[in-house]
């Protein structure tokens, strides 16, 4: 893997950070790899190398599992994702004006992830989840409106590396009054998300179900989403790729899958 590094002056607004008043200029060190540019203020070379290695490994794993790696120049060199590492949580929150509980966030459209050095669970949870969002949307496009469960199901699948935990949890939920069918989870958005554990488990299990048909089939679904005329609903791509006759057909086959999964 070819890496370059340097010390550069960056204006926050010129590097895609719309955080106006925090710091007008600052010194960032930069390290680049095939698919990523890491901006950092204070961090050991070992830590930055780990960010690079983990990011590239996740990129390769995610694109392979989703079937995207067979598309040449899917994410080319000039579209590298950017990861901004503030020196600590206080600096991250001061500059980005994120809420007090926030330790990271991403901007999918501009391929940017923001966090601070040493954030808990960054490597194991946050990084693969946010890269899942970025990679998925980079492939299908940013204008296509989708139910929240589609985006979050894919990202959580990427975070976990598979859907096993989500499937097992959803099977247990399906035996209770808390279970939501696809029509019900399709109505959930960030404003009315009241039971996140149930929602994320079910969303992940649907993604896992779709991927049982093979990642080529999933990539075909995503390609159809990308190429779908704006006036057509996203379900048209789903039904064309998977040959489901209706949403009820998908729902029935998903539930049957939950109880036959081993």
Image (cartoon, rainbow, N blue to C red):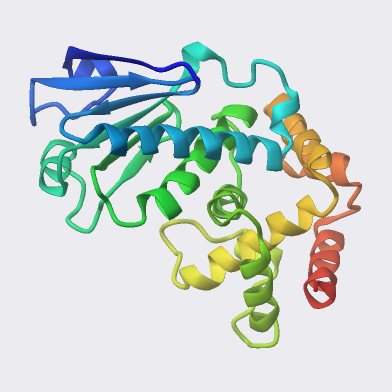
Res 14 → quadrant: top left
Front residue (pair 257, 29): 29
Front residue (pair 253, 131): 131
Left of 40 or right of it: where is 189?
A: right
Left of 53 or right of it: where is 258?
A: right
**Residue visible at 14% across and 26% down?**
20
Q: Is residue 2 above or below residue 253?
A: above
Does residue 228 appear in this view? no
Q: Is residue 165 above or below residue 217?
A: below
Left of 58 or right of it: where is 42?
A: left
Q: Give the image location of residue 177, x and y in percent.
A: 63, 87
Front residue (pair 50, 38): 50
Q: Give the image location of residue 83, x and y in percent.
A: 34, 31
Residue occupying the far front of the picture: 46
**Residue visible at 64% across and 21% down?**
74
Q: Give the image location of residue 12, x and y in percent.
A: 18, 21
Q: Give the image location of residue 241, x and y in percent.
A: 85, 40
Q: Is residue 102 above or below residue 57?
A: below
**Residue visible at 80% across and 73% down?**
262
Res 41 → quadrant: top left
Residue occupying the far bottom of the picture: 176
């Amino acid at each position: 893997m070819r890496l370059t590094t340097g010390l550069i002056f960056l204006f926050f607004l010129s590097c895609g950070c719309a955080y106006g008043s925090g710091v007008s200029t600052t010194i960032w060190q930069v390290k680049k790899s095939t698919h990523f540019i890491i901006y950092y203020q204070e961090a050991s070379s070992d830590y930055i190398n780990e960010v690079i290695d983990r990011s590239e490994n996740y990129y390769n794993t995610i694109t392979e599992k989703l079937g995207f790696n067979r598309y040449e120049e899917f994410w080319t060199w000039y579209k590298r994702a950017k990861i901004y590492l503030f020196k600590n949580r206080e600096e991250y929150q001061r500059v980005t004006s994120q809420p007090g509980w926030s330790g990271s966030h991403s901007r999918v459209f501009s391929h940017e992830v923001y966090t601070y050095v040493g954030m808990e669970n960054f490597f194991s949870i946050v990084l693969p989840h946010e890269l899942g969002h970025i990679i998925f949307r980079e492939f299908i496009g940013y204008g296509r409106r989708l139910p929240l469960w589609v985006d979050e199901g894919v990202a959580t699948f990427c975070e976990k590396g598979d859907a096993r935990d989500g499937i097992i949890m959803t099977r247990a939920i399906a035996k209770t009054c808390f279970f939501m069918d696809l029509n019900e989870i399709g109505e959930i958005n960030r404003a009315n998300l009241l039971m996140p554990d149930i929602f994320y488990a079910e969303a992940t299990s649907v993604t896992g179900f779709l991927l049982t048909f093979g990642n080529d089939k999933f990539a075909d679904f995503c390609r159809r989403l990308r190429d779908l005329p704006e006036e057509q609903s996203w379900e048209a791509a789903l039904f064309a790729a998977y040959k489901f006759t209706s949403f009820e057909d998908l729902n029935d086959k998903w539930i049957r899958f939950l109880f036959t999964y081993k």
